[in-house]
Image (cartoon, grey):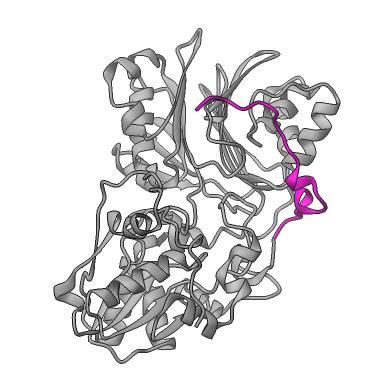
Amino acid sequence: MISPTETETAFDPNADRLREECGVFGIYGHADAAALTALGLHALQHRGQEAAGIVSFDGTRFHSERRLGLVGDAFSEASVIDKLKGKQAIGHVRYSTTGETILRNVQPLFAELHGGGFALAHNGNLTNGLTLRRNLVRDGAIYQSTSDTEVLLHLVARSRKQNFVDRFVEGIRQIEGAYAFVGMTNKKLIGARDPLGIRPLVLGELDGCPILTSETCALDIIGAKFIREVENGEVLIVSESGIESHKPFPPIAERPCIFEYIYFARPDSIVKGRSIYERRKAMGAVLAQESPANADVVVPVPDSGVPAALGYAQASGIPFELGIIRNHYVGRTFIEPTQKVRELGVKLKHSANRSVVEGKSIVLVDDSIVRGTTSFKIVKMMREAGAREVHFRISSPPITHPDYYGIDTPDREKLLAATHSLEEMRQFVGADSLAFISVDGLYRAMGHERRDPLRPQFTDHCFTGDYPTSLTDVIGESAKQQISLLAEAG
């Protein structure tokens, strides 16, 4: 029987999950700009927990606060918010998909350009960022971070266009990959979305003041009104004159990231008019139709598996029960020196509800399997709590390819589904049965008849290997190049 090695089962509660992307927020013309930005970042905390930052402008000077850690730790004190003066501000929560988690990489990044200061926050990943960086450094550019976001600062700085908007557009025309940018000058708030619309960005309004942010949940927390989504390939310029829309790219069909619906977006967010919560329930319902199980209860792996498990239970008629209780007060945990203690670590985050699972045949529902090590531990926990049978059901298709657009997935050889058959995966996690939603089933849950192979409706390369853009940095050895010689004390 295939089972995880001792190294694979070493405990890190975050190592076997899809790592969140980043979240951006910006507001123009409001007296409480910094405080509202901090609240918006609170709502986007699920998109990045490693660092947070805010830059504001008071009409004369820019003010910046960038901190490692959670938003609540960095921006909960009035004294911090009071330093961020001005009626316009942008903010960022970070999970490091490129660049180390060190203070110089915390966004928004800021640069003094010809014509004034420019602050920039980025959700996504540039697939030609390393190549552009190498060329820029060869031409004399001096980098202060190891983040691919800084590439755009240099491109804008080097543009010979007279108008800032033209300089910004010239910069984004040179980059490839996925991005939602929110930027700020002394006169403007800028939003930009990649030509395929892989990364999300929405426009809202509070007290007549425009807002740009990653998800509608950040509008809800401050009582703002949702106006519309920023279109794929669109650049929005907010100024005293109002909102201008620019379309610098040829029109193409959008392909938003399917993982926003499966995992990343908060359940109470709305994306393209679709309720994230309802889409996840629909995924569970389709999963129940495709892969039924003879069981006594449906148990979600909290929190991300809950809506899909509800959908599975409703479609199958099997009772839904909270057979696993999640401890929400666990941060990043230290790795203990002994294997025995490491194996206990999973219980810091998830505990079995023995009264629900003991003696029962259960359907265990989760949103994905990455390496499989956490799935192995949770199945083992269910058996130790007395589960008679464990039927594992996954509301996304098998993840067989890595992501290069802002999701930190392991290399392909570390993805369980890329190296194991379905039966080998079942043995690895220790379940009595294992099934994933099909790709076409996922598309049905999203309201489509099936996936269109000629014009896919979503960016779904993690399941299909169909990457929607060129992967310049991945070709050859450029993706493995060292990009900084500086090691900072932690």
Q: What residue do we see at 28% from left, 54% from top?
A: 348
Q: Is residue 190 above or below residue 393?
A: above
Corner quadrant of residue 414: bottom right
Corner quadrant of residue 39: top left
Does the magenta run of residues contain 475?
yes
Corner quadrant of residue 152: top right
Does the magenta run of residues contain 385?
no
On the image, the x and y values in percent for residue 465 come to: 68, 68
Q: Which residues are magenta?
A: 468-490
Q: Residue lying farthest top?
A: 60
Q: What residue do we see at 35% from left, 69% from top?
A: 378
Q: Nearer the viewer, residue 379 or 17?
A: 379
Does the rendering let one see residue 385?
Answer: yes
Q: Main secondary structure of the magenta part?
A: loop
Does the rendering let one see residue 173?
Answer: no
Taking the image as shown, residue 277 lies to the left or right of residue 457, namely left
Q: What residue do we see at 55% from left, 23% from top?
A: 188
Taking the image as shown, residue 222 lies to the left or right of residue 402, namely left
Q: Is residue 313 above or below residue 31?
A: below
Q: Is residue 318 above or below residue 31?
A: below
Q: Residue lying farthest right?
A: 139
